Image (spheres, rainbow, N blue to C red):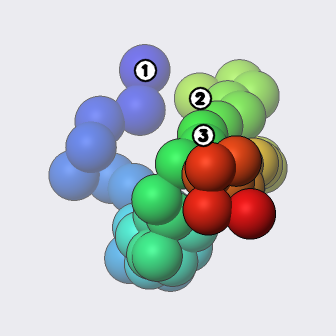
Amino acid sequence: MNKVGKTSDVWVHRILSALDNLKYGTVEIVVHEDRIVQINRVERNRFDHEKA
């Protein structure tokens, strides 16, 4: 099992970048054989219908 301390600074930076300026949405981290292999970011845009 991969420990948090073993996660490279590159991946930590990529995760933080995915979270940067994310107001609504999800960040999914895909792990394969104890290694981070992919980061998916889904951003949701919400609109106020009363102001439109």
Q: Are marks 2 and 1 in contact (CB under 8 Å)?
A: yes
* Above or below: residue 10 compared with residue 32: below
Whichever of labels 1 and 3 marks the residue nearer the N terminus, that label is 1
Pointer 3: residues within 10 angstroms few (<14), some, or many (20+)? some
Residue 34, which numbered label?
2
Disc 3 and disc 2: Cα gap in Å? 21 Å
Callout 2: 10 Å neighbours few (<14), some, many (20+)? few
Asked where in the image residue 2 lies, by quadrant, the reply is top left
Is 4 rendered above or below residue 51?
A: above
- Amino acid type for the residue under numbered disc 3: Thr
The crowding category of the residue bearing disc 1, from other C-alpha atoms within 10 Å (few below 14, some 14 to 19, many at least 20), is few
First in sequence, mark 2 or 1: give its number: 1
Q: Which mark is residue 20?
A: none
Q: Would you say 38 lies left or right of 16 here?
A: right
Position of residue 7 relative to residue 11, above or below, is above
Residue at x 39%, y 56% (from the top left corner): 7
The part of the image, by quadrant, that contains residue 34 is: top right
Q: Amino acid at mark 2?
A: Asp
Query: Distance from label 2 to label 1 (Cα)?
Result: 6 Å
Read off the residue under disc 1: 1
Task: Name the front one of labels 1 and 3.
Answer: 3
Looking at the picture, tell me which residue is in the foreground, 30 or 28: 28
Return the mark for residue 26.
3
Q: Quadrant of the image for the N terminus?
A: top left
Residue 36 seen in render: no
Q: Amino acid at mark 1?
A: Met
Mark with earlier residue (3, 2): 3
Residue 4 screen position, x and y as percent: 27, 43
SS label for mark 3: strand
